[in-house]
Amino acid sequence: MCGRYVRRSDKQKIAEHLHANPTPQDLPMPAADYNVAPTTHQPIIRQSRETGEREMILGRWGLIPFFTKDLKEIKGLSTINARAETIATSRTWREPMKKRRCLIPVNAFYEWPKEGKPPKQPYAFELTTGSLFAFAGIWDAWKDGEATGFSRTPS
Amino acid sequence: MSRIHPRMPVILHPRDYDRWLDREETELLPFDLLRPFESEAMEMREANPKVNNVRNNGPELLQQAEQAAESGFSCLAC
């Protein structure tokens, strides 16, 4: 499955809607992004270990497993989506699924038909209410600077 | 939704956010939340093929190509 989504709400709206504490760090992000692509840094919401409250941080779309030695090991887009059937067994997903789950704020997402030849007609999906919603995500922290990556979970 | 693609991202209901975010280790991990969202609560439409290129961005990507296209016009002269 392809990966592209829309984030139309700015950080203030996201924080209000998902009851996240405004984070002390300044999050450099555009007010809206209609073509969010893998490997870019995007806002996610997680539970703070210290306070237990929800906090918003920027993470890289494409989780980097904690055991990764070199970013080159992450092949292409292999970690942008976790699959429900391997999330409990795969080394990449197992630990994050236990205690590093997150919300990914989204206003709409795109899918391309699996069948057929390119160029394919993309489709946009939204809630009928037009409201902001959240993908189920998991995140992990990686040693070298690029701290936090996340993946979404397809059903 | 599944007629476009067999797999869809998991969308959580607000009532499940706390459980999904909880970091306490538990035997009862929220695997039960990994299920398709009610399709009657979602709507689908054709998007603008310009979204295929990551360099394109803007609200017109959510619109059908025809609506997003710039319209030109001419006056008729006789």
Image (cartoon, coloured by chain):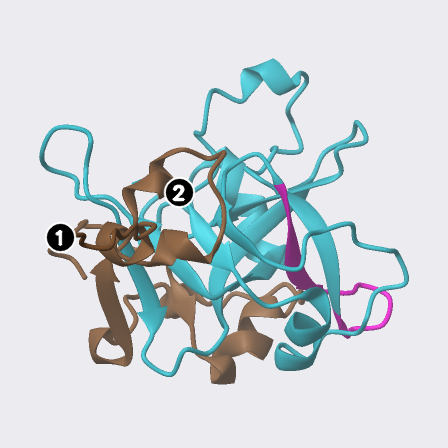
Chain colours: A cyan, B brown
Quadrant where the N terminus of chain B is found in the figure? bottom left
Please identify the quarter of the rendering in which residue A148 is found.
top right
Q: Is residue B36 above or below residue A2?
A: below
- Indicate the chain on which mark 1 is placed: B
Q: Is residue A149 above or below residue A51?
A: above
Number of the label disc, if any, that sits on residue B78: 1
Q: Is residue A154 visible?
A: no
Q: Is residue A118 above or below residue A149?
A: above
- Secondary structure, mark 2, is loop
| Distance between the alpha carbons at the discs numbered 1 and 2 | 52 Å
Q: Is residue A72 visible?
A: yes
Q: Is residue B18 above or below residue A41?
A: below
Number of the label disc, if any, that sits on residue A3: 2
**Closer to the camera, A108 or A53?**
A108
The answer to whether residue A128 is left or right of residue A89 is left
For badge 2, the amino acid type reads Gly
Identify the residue shown where x is 40% and y is 63%. B31
Q: Position of residue A136 (x, y in %)?
A: 48, 61
In the rendered structure, which segment of residues is drawn in magenta? A41-54
